[in-house]
Image: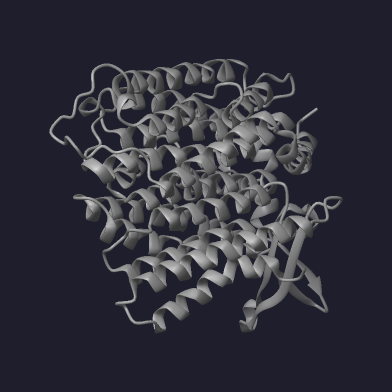
Amino acid sequence: MPYLLSLLIFSPLAAVLLAGLLPSRKHQWFRMLALAVSIGQLLALIALFNSLSPNISLYYAEQARWLNISLGTWGVLQANYLVAVDGLSLPLVALSVVVLLIAVISSWHEQKNVKGYFMLLLTLNGAIIGSFCALDMLLFYVFFEFMLIPMYFLIGIWGGARREYASVKFLLYTLFGSILILIVFIGLYLGVGVVQFGQILHSFSVLDWQDAHYHMTGSWLTSSETYGGFTLKAWAFLFLLVGFGIKLPTVPFHTWLPDAHVEASTPISVILAALLLKVGGYGLARVVLPVFPAETIQFSGLVGGLGVVSIVYGGFNALASKDLKRLIAYSSVSHMGFVLLGLASGTTEGIAGAVYQMTSHGIITSMLFLIAGVLYDRTHDRLIDNYSGLSTVMPRYTALIMIAFFAGMGLPGFSGFIAEVLVLLGGFNPLSLVPVWLPALAASGLLLAAGYFAWTIQRMLYGPFVTKGFAGTLTDLTSRERFMLVSLAILTLWLGILPQGLLSLINPFAEGLSRLLSEHLVP
């Protein structure tokens, strides 16, 4: 079927225009519209899987002319509407469709400015999926920036007591990273091109950026001059590492994340942790490693080291957290460190593990924030020490929180186990680009995860039931909450027990990127 990716990207944006015409008092209409769009995207995703061409590098692609603007002596500004899915983007697009559907269901009882809320949620929907599909980097940057606006307002208007501070901090951090990314993207556009009919045609396509034949002789991409001890290509690599590292987020660029999570409402925390963080990992795997393979090898120790620091630092902060949402936020910092380590290893196992980790973490962290939201909706309290003995009054909730926490620990049978084992295997591989002590140290993150999740289980679920001032409000899961949590639990178990289906999609991308990096190793 044609135009399935366009349908996934633009159907929520079209729904925004329709929602703008509806009267604000019709709250249920906006809920039903958002739900209809998400269900339609799920059906389009199923059709997409049935339309894949798995024997080529791009499983599904769409292309059309977008911009063709004459700039006089500067040449012609060209950009294409080029969207596609491969072993990197397809799992993230599928994850986006599922998580955004869960976010709509989780938002069902939102009462504050319902029209504005669902219009922003639908806008964010299209921008996220567009970012994961775009192979023209100007188009990617448009979607990348377009995510900031709705997320800023969704935190700043519908968040907690310190929502203004958290939303501004999120915006400033991300804008700083975006500026660094834009500088490099402009440089790559000017440094990549072909000569046709006496005219230089530049390109925003990341596929052209990866092809050394398009790197124009005499441009900064072929220069060996150094500035501050590094070539311009090395500086470009570092700019992109910081830009996408802020979004990931990696230590020390992570401080916006705990504040944003604590103040955001439950559905927005789910989207932020499950999807927006993955754009950082996606950018590293899509642009940074394949476009700068020599620099990736040069700085592999730095990248892997940042990943390990994030794993350990995030784990210790989660262990010290008293707020349940802050604990989950720091656990995300820790688990996303495995993405950096896997990519830095440059091995097929490590890269495949990084992509698997992004997908797995999106599912698990959605469960974790929904679980935190269940308690907060009933008691307006997130302090772990204020809960005890929940298993006696909330047995269904207890069963699902145990699944989510065990998955977060990376125990066998859950998707996190497969991802983290692949990353560690890639790091210990003799062909790995990172020193062997880095994955050895990263393994301590598994022990830390077991510590903070097991300790939370012990404090919150067992012992005498203590109400801490909110007696009578703790009821077990509703049918809506059960549907969301059980669906995610099935997914993490499925990917933990039967990983080969997803790995068969990821492996061609991982093998190709690993082969590209190995070709740039100095004999």
> Which image quarter is the N terminus in?
bottom right
- Left or right: residue 385 versus residue 489 is left
Above or below, 366 against 89 in this view is above
> Which image quarter is the C terminus in?
top right
Q: How is the image coloured?
A: one colour
Question: What percent of the width, then of the height, locates residue 320?
Answer: 29, 23
Q: Which image quarter: residue 475?
A: top left
**Residue 481 visible somewhere in the drawing:** yes
Residue placed at 76% from the left, 60% from the top? 60
Residue placed at 55% from the left, 30% from the top? 338
Question: What percent of the width, then of the height, locates residue 506?
Answer: 72, 41
- Left or right: residue 111 versus residue 416 is left
> For this rendering, which residue is in front, 482 or 512?
482
Looking at the image, which residue sits at the far left? 469
Residue placed at 39% from the left, 67% from the top? 118
Q: How many marks?
A: 0
- Left or right: residue 208 versus residue 188 is right
Question: What percent of the width, then of the height, locates residue 178?
Answer: 46, 56
> For this rendering, which residue is in front, 468 or 431?
468
- Left or right: residue 336 versus residue 398 is right
Above or below, 111 against 69 in this view is above
Q: Which image quarter: residue 507?
A: top right
> For this rendering, which residue is in front, 522 or 120?
120
Question: What percent of the width, then of the height, locates residue 192?
Answer: 70, 61
Q: Which image quarter: residue 512?
A: top right
> For this rendering, which residue is in front, 492 or 157?
492
